[in-house]
Amino acid sequence: MLRWPRIAPLHSELAIRPTRWLTRVVSSGKTNSNLALGLLFAIALWGGNNAGTKWILAAWPPVWAGATRFLCAGGLLLLLLRYTPWLGHYITPSRELNRALWLRGGLSLAAYIVAFNSALVFTSASHVALYLGAAPVWALIWESWENKKSPSGLHWIAAVLALSGVGLLLWPALAASSVSLPGECLGLASSMLWTNYGRQSRKLSVSLNGVEVTAHTMWRAAVWLAPIAVFELAKRNLTINPTILGVQSYCIIAGGVVAFALWNRTLGYWPTSRVLLFNNLIPLSTMTWAYFFLSEPITKTFIAAMILIVAGVALGQVRVGAGRRDK
C-alpha cells in the first residue's frame, strides 16, 4: 500500500530548516570527510526522489515532470543566491560562460533527465538504478582515455566491488521481472548521460561554485525541455492533487536543490569517477525508502550487497588529498 503522505514531515523539515546546515556544508566544507558526508546525504535524498519520481510518472508525462522540477529548483536556487548570503554571492556569467552553461550544462542535464524519466516509464526503478551504478566505470574509462594513462588499481577494484554489490542487490528484481528493451536501452543511456553531466559540471566548477552550477544548469535544462513538455501536455491530460504536488515538492527541494548542490560542490574537489562511485549507494538508498514507505522487506541479499557497496565506496576514497582540486 503506497503511503506517500508520510513524506510531508520530511519535506516540511527541509523547507523550514535547511539553510544553516546547507550553508555550512556547501559553503565551507572542503575536507574529504565533509564532502563525503554531503554526498551521503545527497544519496539519501535521491533515493526518495527516485521512488517519488517513479510514482509521479504514473500520472504525469516524463519530460513535463523533469522540466517543472528543474525550473522550480533552479529558480529557487537563483533567488537564494541573488537575494540572500546563505549560499554565497551571485555572479553574473560572462558571455563565454553563459554559452558553456547552455551547451555544456543545461543541454547535458536535459538529455539525462529525458533518458532517466523515460526509462522509469518502461522499466522498474531497480533496473534504472543498476545502470546508474555503472556510471563510475564510464567515468574511469573516460578519464583514462582523456589523460592517456590508466587509473590506479585500487580505484578499478573499488568500482568492481561496488558494481558487484549493486548486481547482488538487484539480481532478484532482475530475475523476477520482465525485460523491456526500450527501458533497458534508456537506462543504459541515462547512466552514460549522467557521467557526461558530471564531467561538464566539473569543468564549469572552475568558474562557478557548486550551487551556482546547479542553479544555472537546471533552469537552462528546463528551457531546453519546454517544447517537448508542451507537446506532452497537448497529448495527455495532467492530473493534479495534493499528494502529487507534495511528492513533486519533495523532488524539487530535496532531490533538486539540496542534493544537486552538494553533488556539484564535490565535483569541484574530486575527480568525476570518484564522485560517481557514490552512485552505487543510490540503489541502497532507494530500497531503504521502499522499506519504510512501501513495506518491502530487507533481505540477507540486501545486507551482503550493502557490505560490498560500502567497501567499494570506502576503497575509492583511499589516497585522496584533502580538499584537493584535481585538474
Image (cartoon, helix red, strand yellow):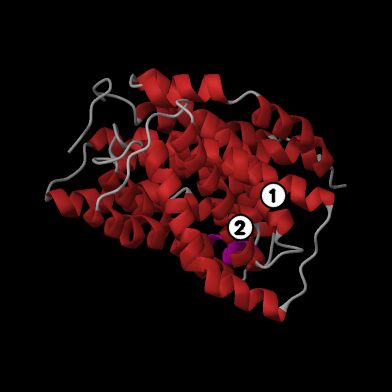
Horizontal and vertical percent position of residue 2: 84, 47
| Residue 190 visible from this viewpoint | no
Q: Are marks 2 and 1 in contact (CB under 8 Å)?
A: yes
* Left/right of residue 143 with respect to residue 2 in the rendered view: left
Q: Closer to the camera, 172 or 98?
A: 98
Which image quadrant is residue 246 in? top right
Horizontal and vertical percent position of residue 98: 30, 55
User: Amino acid under label 1?
Assistant: Gln
Name the residue at the left extreme: 148
Q: Image height check: is 20 above or below 115?
A: above
Q: CA distance from mark 2 to mark 1?
A: 9 Å
Which image quadrant is residue 90 in? top left
The region drawn magenta spans 115-120
Please tell me how many numbered marks the rendered image carries.
2
Residue at 52 percent of width and 65 percent of height:
114
| Residue to which mark 1 is pinned | 248
| Residue to which mark 2 is pinned | 68
User: Amino acid under label 2?
Assistant: Thr
Magenta span contains residue 178 = no
